[in-house]
Image (cartoon, helix red, strand yellow):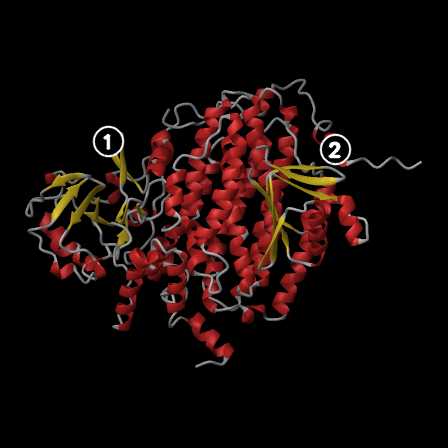
Amino acid sequence: MAAKKLNIKDKYRLLTRDLDWEFSYQDRKQAFPFEEFEGIKITDWSQWEDPFRLTMDAYWKYQAEKERKLYAIFDAFAQNNGQLNISDPRYVNALKIFLTGVSPLEYQAFQGFAHTGRQFSGVGARVACQMQAIDELRHVQTQIHAMSHYNKFFDGLQDWSHMHDRVWYLSVPKSFFNDARAAGPFEFMVAIGFSFEYVLTNLLFVPFMSGAAYNGDMATVTFGFSAQSDEARHMTLGLEVIKFLLEQHEDNIPIVQKWIDKWFWRGTRLLTIVAMMMDYMLPNKVMSWKEAWEVYFEEAGGALFKDLARYGIRMPKYADLIEQEKEHISHQAWWTFYTHGHAAGFHTWIPTDEELDWLSEKYPHTFDQYYRPRWELAKAMEAKGERFYTKALPQLCTTCQIPMLFTEMDDPTQIAYRESLYQGERYHFCSDGCKDIFDEEPEKYIHSWLPVHQIFQGQCGGPEVEDILRDYYRMNVGADNLDMKGSPDEARWKLWKGVA
Amino acid sequence: MSKVYIALQDNDESRYLVEAIQADNPTAEILYMPAMIRIEAQNFLVVKRASVEEVMGRDWDVQEIHLNLITLGGNVDEDDEQLTLTWNQ
Amino acid sequence: MPVRAITPDYCGEMKDKVENFHGNQIVYVGWDHHLMFCAAFAYPLPPETPFRVLRDQVMPEAFSLHPQWESIDWEQTTWLLDGAPFVPQLDTGLQAQGIGHKSLLRFQTPELKGYQNAGV
């Protein structure tokens, strides 16, 4: 007689309970040395439950099917010269940021979850981290495959992993993940599994990817949604981690709250670049950054924190400030890249008149007052043949490593400056959020690899900026950087499309 | 009250999923966006195997939803019969 | 606790101490309410650099792109050094008048309100 088919609850129990073993001749604490130093108290790992109850057999089956669908679309995209069907060649510059800034983070996430999974003594958490590690590896691979097609036709995609390690603005995402991976396993889970996955990756992988579809990029929307379908599992894991930690011991609550405060702030700062990609780099617009923020942070995050209130968890610190900043940060970031377009590995441009009007409409409280005048100035300079590139290097925030471009929300034309003294040395921050993070753990941030300071220390070649770009960053100077107008990307596009 | 939500890729299978979800969650709101369909409901949403099988006219495993899923929000619970999303508030 | 680490008494290496800058110190200079420049600029300078050299020889390269740079009246300009009011001595070295490594200098030109009077 055939064995009765197990239901998914039974299968999950067999995988996550019965596969574990007692340690008879080794000290359990020595086997899991990272489990205690963060101060988190776990009394009973068996309380861990994956709400999807995903087992390895089902995992491989469905992941394989997702991959088959995805690669069929990549093939079709390549075979049909899909790069010619995008809305506008400016769009590809968002992919250059994605490949150099985001895809390497998928690899860091893989490394982080592999390590973290190894360090948990609870088998349910271990299995979940293992699956997530494999997911993240899949994401980096599929992203490289998808964008390799664009690399045949556009500049700036050729040396992304080298650039990730060296280029000044890419130290922002790189250091974000290094910070998380250098933390203990529980902080890593709260940082990446919860704060980043639950609220913040949605903003990249849902509205931005929908925007990719709207701009004719079927390859990117497909890898994006395929990755995000894994993220839906990760989000669920992230929420379970939080609930599990809060239910295990009341002493965990203040520790978890502090991590939530830190990582929501860090994630918000990191997403400044996504804000700019949505508002300025998608020629066909789906929604503004502000609207996306309202749906995925304020509404979805708000619901989440209402749900967690019963554990004594409150909204992340500075949530009120974050709400005000949604009206500003995309404009401040694109202006920063426009004015540093000579040193960026992608092209920048002045928004068209229609785009400026769209921004006015979407940002009625801020755009015409604070940001349109910057573009009027840029237009006036360009008309005189003096396209504006900044001629000195910017001051950076010690924590987030972003140029100190953020302004006071009660005085939006004034840069926000914060500082701390530690052991006689002065450190600068873009915000109270970044200053708090430093003050909490200064020994972690005094060795920030700040690109501007590294250049001045002679660690990045030189002496001229162009030497650094060419030799240290390995950019093709004159092709990868500078304005979209007059770029080889633009010239090739016109040739393909038969326009003068 | 807060919104739970699920977003699906806009494709052939999802059309059946949306039909089944609509039948089981009459107050849910369906939003069509480029390449995706977002379904929102107050505090609770259910996707039932039996309802999906009914509209698809074939066997359907609840875990198959991962093939068309983009994202979701809410506390998840999944077994052989259904997937639910809940906010406890 | 200066860091939460598994290694007892973990200490980070201070990457940006002045000794690493080959005889220079870092000075940041920002023009308040003039956001044509997205952030303050960072300059590596010998500590004995006279303030006049910073203002008249170092700063113009980047700042003079601003259409209002030529209109600045330095007699009317006010300064903040690390957040406190400051009166620069033009012929004294940076370090000698308290401008240290990674000090921030901000200057204000209240009569100049930026491009289109918009703080740009």
> The C terminus of chain A is located in which quarter?
bottom left
Q: Residue at x 56, y 55 (%)?
A: A143
Q: Is residue A454 above or below residue A148?
A: above
**Which residue is pictured at 42% across the width and 35% down the height?**
A262
Q: Which quadrant of the figure has residue A176?
A: top left
In depth, the one of A68 and A302 nearer the eye is: A302
Q: Share a chain, discs 1 and 2?
A: yes
Occupied quadrant, residue C58: bottom left
Disc 1 marks a residue whose amino acid type is Gly
Q: Earlier in the sequence, mark 1 or mark 2?
A: 2
Chain on which label 1 sits = A
- Name above or below for residue B9 compared with residue A155: above
Q: Which residue is mark 1?
A: A424
Do we see residue A274 in this rendering? Answer: no
Judged from the image, the secondary structure of the residue bearing numbered disc 2 is helix
Q: Residues within 10 Å of mark 2 (few under 14, many from 20)?
A: some
The answer for which chain carries disc 2 is: A
Q: Which mark is residue A97?
A: none
Closer to the observer: label 1 or label 2? 2
In this figure, which residue is indicated by the disc labeled 2? A9
Query: Is residue C81 toward the left or the right of residue B56 in the image?
Result: left
Q: Amino acid at mark 2?
A: Lys
Q: Is disc 1 surrounded by few (<14), some (14 to 19) or many (20+) residues within 10 Å?
A: few
Residue A265 screen position, x and y as percent:
41, 39
| Left or right for A147, reference B24 | left
Using the numbered discs, state the Cα–Cα distance from disc 1 to disc 2 in whole angstroms. 58 Å
